[in-house]
Amino acid sequence: MKIWITGISGQVGRALQDVLERHGIDHFGTTHAEVDIADSEQVRPYIDRATHIINAAALAQVDVAETERDRAFRANALGPENLAKQAQGKARLIHISTDYVFDGRLRRPYREEDETNPLNWYGQTKLEGELRILTHMPDACIIRPSWVFGGEGRNYASLMLDLMRQRTELRIVNDQIGRPTYAFDLAEALIAMRDESGIYHYANHGSLSKYAFARAIWESAKQKGIPMACERILPIHASAYPTPAVRPLYTPFDTSKIEQKLTIRPWREALAEYFEEKRVQKPVAI
Ligand SMILES: NC(=O)c1ccc[n+]([C@@H]2O[C@H](COP(=O)([O-])OP(=O)(O)OC[C@H]3O[C@@H](n4cnc5c(N)ncnc54)[C@H](OP(=O)(O)O)[C@@H]3O)[C@@H](O)[C@H]2O)c1
């Protein structure tokens, strides 16, 4: 077994590398500069070297995707399609999708077979990626996480901590509800699911608002003695914080399908580990 991680310098790519090293599993990774996953010529030589591909490459910045549409489509739809097309019959593909394939209007936790209806371009390109993969490789494994945090690089927890270090007051959306996913738990799940097929929802247990999650990060940082400028965090409605891309307001997952294969811990436990591991003490650029 040899696993190829695409997008190795991203948040999940780096977590995967860390976990694979810890487990002593043979692997190699490529950065965007080394391999653009949508480029057939660049991808080809790597397919032959791997038994499994975990595709951690994507344009995952939701607002950037809204304005840089071609770049997002290339990374999130054409890239996954290219990997599936070329890997078919040669290597297994484990792909990462998102809760943003849903519109958030269901008002109960989303199951894998629920109707998709992305509200923004990022979600549309990610859904297109899923569909194109399954056309070329029906036995691929697609894991949809939500609100990924805690890896190195840009993510909700590092962004909040940076803002808390810089500002005395934060206003955070209180009507967007979801389930956070710790990048290192996701990495373990992606590896555990490497020989499975189909679509699976994965997130840590417990759903909450972005505001409540920011407060939990704040409390943990205070307990840890991390110096911060932040004195208060105020709840606001999403409508008071317009962004280039519209976000779905309610996307907690039903994770019972994947829980037949692995166990999932609560986000609080994962957040505690994030602070214990001192990953937060390295300031991250926004
Ligand atoms: N972050 C979240 O909250 C979240 C939530 C749900 C699902 N996800 C999914 O989780 C996966 C990993 O996200 P992440 O948080 O690790 O994102 P990330 O930190 O932005 O990492 C993505 C990596 O992919 C690379 N990349 C972009 N386009 C590429 C291309 N065409 N070819 C090869 N590499 C390319 C990027 O390189 P450059 O930066 O150099 O372009 C970056 O290193 C993605 O599929 C994302 O959609 C993320």
Image (spheres, grey):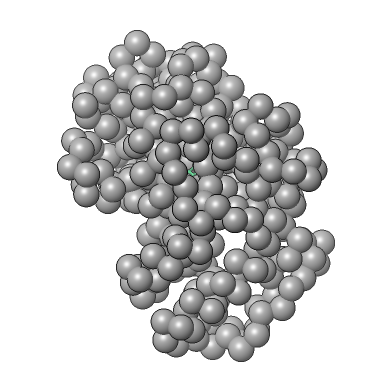
- Whether residue 121 is situated above or below residue 154 in the rendered picture: above
* 243 relative to 160 in the view: left or right: right
User: Could you say where residue 229 lies in the image, as x and y percent from the top left?
Assistant: 54, 88
Q: Is residue 108 visible?
A: yes
User: Could you say where residue 267 lies in the image, as x and y percent from the top left?
Assistant: 51, 59
- Whether residue 154 is situated above or below residue 6 in the rendered picture: below
Q: Quadrant of the N terminus?
A: top left
Q: Which residue corresponds to the image point at 46% horizontal and 26% vertical from the top-left?
A: 141
- Whether residue 229 is situated above or below residue 111 in the rendered picture: below
Most extreme residue toward the top, as rendered?
A: 89
Quadrant in which residue 35 is drawn? top left
Q: Is residue 10 visible?
A: no
Q: Which residue corresponds to the image point at 77% horizontal and 70% vertical from the top-left?
A: 236
Along the line of sight, the residue nearer the viewer: 37 or 102: 102
User: Could you say where residue 124 lies in the image, as x and y percent from the top left?
Assistant: 66, 34
Q: Which residue corresponds to the image point at 52% horizontal and 42% vertical from the top-left?
A: 202
Along the line of sight, the residue nearer the viewer: 103 or 87: 103
User: Could you say where residue 283 lies in the image, as x and y percent from the top left?
Assistant: 39, 73
* 251 relative to 223 in the view: left or right: right
**Number of numbered labels in the structure image:** 0
